[in-house]
C-alpha cells in the first residue's frame, strides 16, 4: 500500500500548477520609479528565500515521517526528496497554506520599507551637502594657510624694489594687490633713506590711484604721509547729496516732513547751517519731486554754502556775483536778502545762462539781473566803487572735486595751475575795484575756489594785498583749517592769511574748498604805502639795525615807539637788550649788473695774486 501511494505521488509530480505566491505578486502593479523597482526586487528575493526555507522544512517533515514508517526503503526516501519542491508547490496551492498570511503581510512591510528608504535618501542628501560644505571649508583653510605661508616666506624686513624689478613691473599690467601691500609697508617701514621711500611711494600711488606725476608730487609735499592716504581715499568716495531749503517759499522743518513722507531718508546737514539737509537714500528721484519743481529746495553741495555764509549779504544792498551759474549761490544770496536790493548775476559762458535763469525763476528770485560779460570787464560795465559786496567763486583747476571729476587726476599740470592763477588774480582785482570802501554796511569781497593748490588760493590773496588797499578779515566760519602762511620755503605770505579757511574731504566730508574774506579800506587804485607784505615778513625773521639815535626797527612798529617815548618821559631805564639791540649789517640790495661786475673784479684780483705767487716761486727756484 505504501508503494502504491508513493507511485501515485510520482504520477502527480509532473503536473505543475502555478504557485499562488507568484500569481498574487503579479497582481500588484509594477513600480514606476527606479527606487521603488529596486525595493520590489529586494522584496522578491526575500520572498524566494522564504519559499525555499518553507519547502526545505516540508521536506524535512516528510523525511522524518517516512523514516518513522518501517515499510519505506531508502530509495523511496531519495525519490521523495527529489519530488520535494513540487510537493512544496502543491502545498502552497492548498487553501491551508501557512505562508499565505505572511505574503499578504508583505505589502505592509513593503510600504514601511519604502518610507524608510525615502528617509534614508533624505539623510543621504543631507550627508552629501555636509560633505560638500566641509570640502569647501577645507579648501578655504588651505588657501588661507598657503597665503600665510607665502607671507612668512617673504623677508621680514621690507626691501625696496630694484630698478630691474621696476622695469619688469612696467612691462606688465599693474598688480594692484601687490601695489597696495607695498604702499602699506612703505608707510610702516623703518630704516633706509626717507627720499627713496618717498620716491617709491609717489610712483606706487600714481600707478594705483591713477594720478599723474605732477599732482601726486604736489599732494605728497602738502600733506603728511598718513593724512595723504586719508585724502586720496576720500577722493575715491562720493560726497553726500545735500539740499538747501529755499526760505523764500518754505521752512526746513516743513520741507523735511514732506520729503520724509515721500520716502526720502534725510537729516539736518550740520550745526553750522540752518537751511541744509543731507540725503542718505530716496525712493523717488530727488531732483524730480513736485517740491523741487515748485522751487522749495535746491540741490547744492555743502561747500557751496560757505562763500555765501562768509559774504553775509544784508537787505537792500547791491551785490555782484561774478561767476553765478548754475545759480545755487545767487539764489542763496537772494534768500538771505529776502528778495530786496539788487543782485547782478554775471556768467561769462553763454550756454550756462539757461540753467542760471531757469533756477532763478524756479526758486522765485525777483531781485536779480542776469548779465553775460567777462568778469575782468565788469568794473567798466557796472562802474567802479558801486557795489556793497562782491562774491567771486573763481574758475579753478578743480583739484578739490576729484570725486566728481576724475579726469583732473591726469589732465592738470603746472601750466594749467599757473594759467588759472593768473586769471584769478585779474578777476580778484576787478572784484575789489567794484566794491565801495565807503559803504555803510558793506565793502567786502569774498574769494573762493574748489581747489587745494596754494598757487590758486593763498598766492592770489597775497597778490591782492600787495596791489590794493585791502585787508583780510575773519570769514565768520567757526570750522575749517587756517590757510598757509609759509610753505616749505617756496612761499612766504602775509601773516593775516591765517584768517582764510581751507576745507578737505577727509576732514570735513565735503569737497576741497578755500574761502577768504577781504575788507576794502580805500577806493584809491594805488597800493598802500605802508603795508605788511611778504617782504616785511622776511624782515621780521631777521633783526634790523637801529643806530644810537634811537631809530626804531621797522618790524617793531608804533607800539614799540610809544613804549620807548613813555620810558623816556618817566626816565625809566629799559633793559640793555631792548635799548641796544644787537647791531647787524643792513642787507644792501645790488643791481644784477653790479653783482656780476664785482664778482668779475674779485676773480681778476685772485688771478693776479695767483700769477704773482707763481712768478715768485719761479724766481726762488732759479736763485737756488
Image (tube, rainbow, N blue to C red):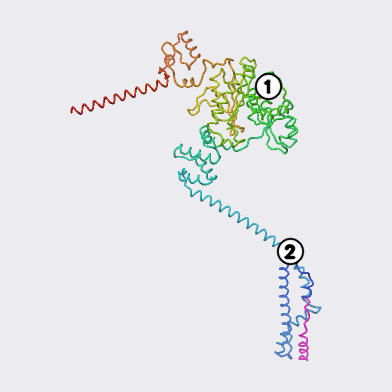
Mark number for residue 488?
A: none
The kind of secondary structure element at disc 1 is: strand
Residues drawn in magenta: 1-20
Up-down: is 447 above or below 205? above
Residue visible at 72% across and 66% down in the picture: 34
Which residue is disc 1 drawn over?
A: 343
Which residue is disc 2 drawn over?
A: 115
Up-down: is 84 above or below 353? below
Up-down: is 357 above or below 526? below
How far is the residue under mark 1 from the one under mark 2?
A: 88 Å
The kind of secondary structure the magenta stretch mainly shows is helix
Mark 1 neighbour density, 10 Å: few (under 14) some (14–19) many (20 or more): many
Check if residue 131 falls in the magenta segment: no
Residue 105 at what x, y percent from top left? 77, 70
Residue visible at 74% across and 88% down in the picture: 69
The kind of secondary structure element at disc 2 is: helix
Check if residue 17 falls in the magenta segment: yes
Q: Is residue 144 left or right of residue 123?
A: left
Camera-nearest residue between 514 and 257: 514
- Pick out the residue farthest to the left: 624
Amino acid at each position: 500500500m505504501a508503494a502504491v501511494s508513493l507511485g501515485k505521488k510520482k504520477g502527480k509530480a509532473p503536473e505543475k500548477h502555478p504557485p499562488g505566491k507568484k500569481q498574487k505578486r503579479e497582481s500588484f502593479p509594477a513600480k514606476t520609479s527606479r527606487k521603488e523597482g529596486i525595493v520590489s526586487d529586494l522584496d522578491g528575493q526575500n520572498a524566494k528565500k522564504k519559499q525555499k526555507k518553507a519547502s526545505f522544512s516540508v521536506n524535512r517533515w516528510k523525511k522524518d515521517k517516512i523514516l518513522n514508517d518501517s515499510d519505506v526503503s531508502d530509495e523511496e526516501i531519495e525519490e521523495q526528496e527529489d519530488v520535494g519542491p513540487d510537493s512544496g508547490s502543491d502545498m502552497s496551492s492548498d487553501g491551508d497554506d501557512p505562508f499565505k498570511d505572511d505574503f499578504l503581510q508583505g505589502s505592509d512591510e513593503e510600504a514601511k520599507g519604502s518610507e524608510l528608504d525615502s528617509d534614508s535618501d533624505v539623510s543621504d542628501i543631507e550627508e552629501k551637502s555636509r560633505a560638500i560644505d566641509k570640502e569647501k571649508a577645507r579648501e578655504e583653510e588651505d588657501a588661507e594657510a598657503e597665503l600665510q605661508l607665502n607671507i612668512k616666506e617673504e623677508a621680514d624686513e621690507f626691501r625696496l624694489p630694484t630698478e630691474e624689478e621696476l622695469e619688469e613691473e612696467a612691462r606688465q599690467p599693474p598688480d594692484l594687490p601687490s601695489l597696495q601691500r607695498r604702499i602699506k609697508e612703505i608707510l610702516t617701514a623703518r630704516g633706509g633713506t626717507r627720499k627713496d621711500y618717498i620716491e617709491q611711494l609717489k610712483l606706487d600711488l600714481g600707478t594705483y590711484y591713477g594720478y599723474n606725476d605732477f599732482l601726486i608730487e604736489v599732494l605728497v609735499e602738502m600733506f603728511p604721509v598718513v593724512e595723504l592716504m586719508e585724502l586720496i581715499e576720500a577722493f575715491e568716495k562720493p560726497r553726500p547729496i545735500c539740499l538747501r531749503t529755499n526760505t523764500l517759499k518754505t521752512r526746513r522743518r516743513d520741507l523735511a516732513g514732506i520729503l520724509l513722507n515721500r520716502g526720502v531718508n534725510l537729516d539736518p546737514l550740520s550745526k553750522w547751517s540752518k537751511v541744509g539737509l543731507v540725503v542718505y537714500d530716496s525712493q523717488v528721484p530727488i531732483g524730480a519731486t513736485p517740491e523741487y519743481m515748485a522751487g522749495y529746495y535746491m540741490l547744492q553741495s555743502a561747500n557751496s554754502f560757505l562763500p555765501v555764509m562768509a559774504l553775509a549779504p544784508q537787505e537792500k544792498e547791491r551785490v555782484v556775483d561774478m561767476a553765478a551759474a548754475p545759480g545755487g549761490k545767487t539764489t542763496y544770496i537772494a534768500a538771505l536778502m529776502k528778495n530786496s536790493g539788487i543782485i547782478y548775476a554775471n556768467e561769462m559762458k553763454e550756454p550756462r545762462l539757461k540753467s542760471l535763469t531757469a533756477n532763478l525763476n524756479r526758486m522765485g528770485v525777483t531781485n536779480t539781473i542776469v548779465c553775460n560779460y567777462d568778469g575782468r570787464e565788469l568794473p567798466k560795465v557796472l562802474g567802479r566803487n558801486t557795489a556793497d559786496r562782491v562774491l567771486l567763486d573763481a574758475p579753478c583747476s578743480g583739484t578739490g572735486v576729484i570725486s566728481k571729476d576724475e579726469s583732473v587726476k591726469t589732465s592738470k599740470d603746472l601750466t594749467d595751475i599757473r594759467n588759472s592763477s593768473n586769471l584769478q588774480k585779474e578777476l580778484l582785482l576787478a572784484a575789489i575795484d567794484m566794491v565801495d570802501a565807503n559803504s555803510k554796511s558793506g565793502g567786502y569781497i569774498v574769494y573762493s575756489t574748489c581747489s587745494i593748490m596754494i598757487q590758486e588760493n593763498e598766492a592770489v590773496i597775497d597778490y591782492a594785498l600787495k596791489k590794493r588797499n585791502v585787508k583780510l578779515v575773519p570769514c565768520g566760519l567757526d570750522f575749517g583749517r587756517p590757510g598757509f602762511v609759509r610753505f616749505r620755503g617756496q612761499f612766504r605770505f602775509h601773516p593775516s592769511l591765517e584768517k582764510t579757511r581751507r576745507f578737505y574731504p577727509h576732514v570735513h566730508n565735503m569737497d576741497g574748498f578755500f574761502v577768504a574774506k577781504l575788507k576794502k579800506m580805500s577806493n584809491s587804485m594805488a597800493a598802500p604805502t605802508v603795508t605788511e607784505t611778504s617782504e616785511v615778513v622776511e624782515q621780521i625773521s631777521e633783526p634790523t639795525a637801529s643806530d644810537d639815535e634811537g631809530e626804531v626797527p621797522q618790524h617793531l612798529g608804533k607800539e614799540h615807539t610809544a613804549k620807548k617815548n613813555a620810558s623816556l618821559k618817566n626816565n625809566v631805564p629799559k633793559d640793555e637788550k631792548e635799548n641796544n639791540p644787537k647791531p647787524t649789517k643792513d642787507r644792501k640790495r645790488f643791481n644784477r649788473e653790479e653783482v656780476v661786475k664785482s664778482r668779475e673784479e674779485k676773480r681778476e684780483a685772485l688771478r693776479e695774486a695767483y700769477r704773482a705767487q707763481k712768478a715768485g716761486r719761479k724766481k726762488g727756484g732759479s736763485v737756488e
